[in-house]
Image: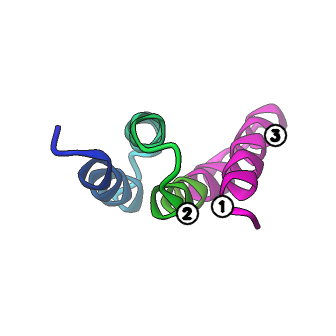
Amino acid sequence: AGGAARLAERAVALSEAGDHRLACHLIETAGRAAPDDDGVHQIRREIYGRRRRSETSLMAKGIYAGALRESDALIGE
């Protein structure tokens, strides 16, 4: 697939286009491929932030906030 960075770039493009579901799928794959890459996890945090803001369900917002916290913990924020 071109590596974790390439997946992360594609995930950003998809998220910016409004396809948050596929963007989250790709950034999860990138994060698992490069668990120590702070750049990938920063992008993961941004994508999940966008998805959280786009949701109307309080439960979904909570799930995506949890993903944000996971990335924060991995990058030390």
Q: CA distance from mark 2 to mark 3?
A: 19 Å
Q: Position of residue 15 (x, y in %)?
A: 41, 55
Q: Which residue lies at the image location 40% right of the left edge and 34% below the top edge?
A: 29
Q: Which residue is mark 3?
A: 62
At horizontal 24% and vertical 45% (from top left) the residue drawn is: 3
Magenta highlight on residue 62 = yes
Q: Amino acid at mark 1?
A: Ile
Q: Which residue is mark 1?
A: 75
> What residue did someone put label 2 on?
42
Q: Quadrant of residue 27?
A: top left
CA distance separating discs 3 and 1: 20 Å
Q: Position of residue 63 (x, y in %)?
A: 75, 35
Q: Quadrant of residue 64?
A: top right
Foreground disc of the pair 2, 3: 2
The spot of residue 68 in percent (x, y) is 70, 51
Magenta span covers which residues? 48-77
Q: Nearer the viewer, residue 10 or 34?
A: 34
Quick one: label 3, few (<14), some, or many (20+) residues within 10 Å?
few
In contact (CB < 8 Å): disc 2 and disc 1: yes
Quick one: label 2 or label 3, which is nearer the N terminus?
Answer: 2
Give neighbour class at mark 2: few <14, some 14-19, many 20+ (Cα, 10 Å): some
Judged by its main secondary structure, the magenta piece is: helix
